[in-house]
Image (tube, rainbow, N blue to C red):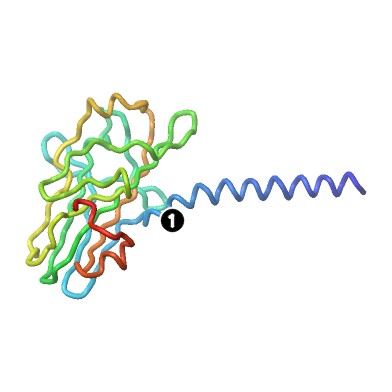
Amino acid sequence: MKNSRRKIAVLIICLVAVIGVISGSLAWYSSTNSITQIGTLAGFRTKANVYLQDESGNKINLQKDENGLFILSADPSAENYVGNLRVNVIHRGYANSYVRVKMSVQWTMLDGTVTQNILLPYTFADGWYDNRDSDYCVYYTEDTGLFEDYDKSIITAFNSEKFAQETMTKDAVAKLAVSVESIQINRYQQVWGIETLPWE
């Protein structure tokens, strides 16, 4: 009788441990707004179009996993190489607003270890401030008053040499979550939870 109770107790402990591991893995996805969002507020509409661009400038669709996360490779010869990533921000409207793009990357190595501490060395377009080392976000540094025609990639280049110096291997796989947010200029503290704008 005691043996059967011990077996049941051990089984319950193992089950709780497995659930804890799964929950920890999924927490990262749920906290990063994993699917590209479309934000519609009074007076403006903002969205992100995430894709790949080859050397000839052709657009290529980027694969997603079952959680809606984009799959990237550290291999320079792969079509979905991280250096080929482009994120078009499309912002239209007549309301004064601030825009930010959140880019969260989780890497899985060959041995199964996971890291989120590697910032991809992108160069961003004029007017965009890279604050990813603090909050994974890139901010547009102007209030976008009459900004109805903005539709271009915020990524202009990728430093492949700097990336190669990281501890990545060519077989590492990245899961990328991208979301874009627009907010009226007088509400960024309340909605984004920051006291001052990062570039100030």
Residue pictured at 14% horizontal, 41% vertical: 156
Q: What is the x, y in percent for residue 59?
A: 17, 44
**Residue at the farthest right position:** 1
Q: Is residue 177 above or below residue 38?
A: above
Q: For this rendering, which residue is in front, 42 or 68?
A: 42
Q: For this rendering, which residue is in front, 180 or 52?
A: 180
Residue pictured at 62% horizontal, 46% vertical: 18
Q: Is residue 112 above or below residue 175?
A: above
User: Helix, strand, or loop for circle 1?
Assistant: helix
Q: How many marks?
A: 1
Q: Is residue 156 above or below residue 91?
A: above
User: Would you name the residue on which mark 1 appears?
Assistant: 30
Q: For this rendering, which residue is in front, 37 or 125?
A: 125
Q: Amino acid at mark 1?
A: Ser
Q: Is residue 95 left or right of residue 24?
A: left
Q: Is residue 111 left or right of residue 155?
A: right
Q: Is residue 36 above or below residue 109?
A: below
Give the quadrant of residue 108.
Answer: top left
Residue pictured at 18% horizontal, 41% vertical: 53
Q: Is residue 61 left or right of residue 156?
A: right
Q: What is the x, y in percent for residue 191?
A: 31, 66
